Image (spheres, grey):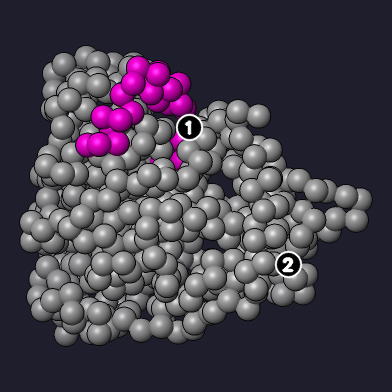
Amino acid sequence: MDYLIAIDQGTSSSRAAIFDRRASLISISQEEFTQIYPKSGWVEHNPEDIWNSVVNVTKDVLSKAKINQNDIKAIGITNQRETTLIWDRETGDPIHNAIVWQDRRTTSICKELRDNGLEDIVIKKTGLRLDPYFSATKISWIIKNVPGAMDLLRKKRLAFGTVDSFLLWRLTGGRTHATDATNASRTMLFNIHTQEWDDELLKIFGIPSSLLPEVHDSNAEFGDLDKDIFGFSAPICGVAGDQQAALIGQAGFKVGMTKITFGTGCFAITNTGDIAIESKNKLLTTVAYRLNNKVTYGLEGSIFVAGSAIQWLRDQLKLIKTADETESIAVSTGMVKNVQIVPAFTGLGAPHWDPEARGAILGLTRDTTKNQIVTATLQSVVFQTCDLAEAMLNDSIELSVIRVDGGMANNSWFLQFLADMLQVKIERPTNIESTIMGVAFLTGLSIGFYDSIDEIEKIWSHDSMFTSKMNKKERDRVYSRWIEAVSRVRSHN
């Protein structure tokens, strides 16, 4: 048998899995790592925690699988996007912690650029909005604020990368400084129409081109694994940002297909084919994937807080011990109407794009219970998803079926409420780990495990389907209460 390793480096944990040619899972491993919050609205990761967790889970899946390492034919990587690292090319050491996609420290930089009338240029070239979410202002911040960075930059010793680039550098022993088109498209420096780093954007953000990685197709060969790390070598030939990987894992290859991933955040992507649709409703135009030098675009809505709201219930409020408890709590509680939770812990994403907004619990009374707070938190993720769906509809995207994945997709009560509120059919795949499945498909496509995307489409199957049981009048009444709650936390109020 031949096998491949898929690495999924996420926001709160790293995972690795081994798959065979039939896309059957042989072994899987996961390891959480520390989240660092230096100041309000700041989020960082220790790059060595990222690296060590990836090494640990990869060693673990190899140990569990009990296979001949020479039968590993390739490795693929999917990663948390926008998270920014800069390291010294000579030592390989990062010069600062990774600044995570959730981080809001560059809000003032974005505001200044916006006030100078530069947002239209950014949107036109990148499909993105001027927001701290993306990599460009994070790079600028590190260059200007880390002692010694400017000196190293003048000597052309610094390298920038999103997490995929950092892992590629480490896994290849410093021989590869590269990324793929999906990750490049999230930096706010990459022209998604020309498929090149853009000189005008680099000038706007004050970033020299010497920092940047080469950009390849998502199914390109990125280099060979350094044999000293795991005791064998294999080509690394599949890379994609986690949300694009999830679209591939959901076999979302046809125009109009939509997937929503409920991970740390919530991310909806609709395949728009070879047309880069410019949203009129503050959604993002992005590269869905680039295979064999052919670009497929997507329209995306990003919510910063989804699964992390459940972590908040567990770790900060101590209302639950495990995320799994939320389903039985919601079933016993039923829909909560009087309490609204807006989990704007790091601002609001699409379609509001309000980095200054902060979270709130509204409608509390003396008889509010912890179960109502837990259920209202689940509902808040659905309501935020409704905001995305409304924006997509206003951009003339017809939503008839949505495929869902991520940890929260295990919760059937949550998915039924989602179907009720979106008024569309929800499909849960047999394997909800679409992100790691997607990079396995991508890598398998690169090395010939699969002949075409048509073959991948035949492998995909759904486990459950949810359809709306709520009439539209009731749905609109419920949603209006959410709209009111959001207006109360917006920074302009």
**Span colored in magenta:** 98-125
Left or right placement of residue 204 versus residue 480 in this view: left
Q: Secondary structure at mark 2?
A: loop
Of callouts 2 and 1, the N-terminal one: 1
Residue 235 x/y as whole percent: 11, 62
Q: Quadrant of residue 313?
A: bottom right
Please, what is the three-letter code of the amino acid marked with disc 1? Arg
Q: Secondary structure at mark 1?
A: loop
Q: What label sits on residue 232 in the rendered view?
A: none
* Residue for badge 1: 104
Furthest-right residue in view? 366
**Residue 112 in sight:** yes
Residue 315 x/y as whole percent: 65, 51
Picture residue at 10% right of the left edge, 71% below the top: 447
Please, what is the three-letter code of the amino acid marked with disc 2? Met
Q: What label sits on residue 335 in the rendered view?
A: 2
**Quadrant of the image containing the C terminus:** top right
Left or right placement of residue 405 versus residue 160 in this view: right
Q: Is residue 231 above or below residue 344?
A: below
Mark 2 to mark 1 CA distance (whole Å): 32 Å
Residue 188 x/y as whole percent: 28, 36
The front one of 87 and 203 is 203
**Quadrant of the image containing the N terminus:** bottom left
**Residue 6 in sight:** no
Is residue 123 a member of the stretch shown in magenta?
yes
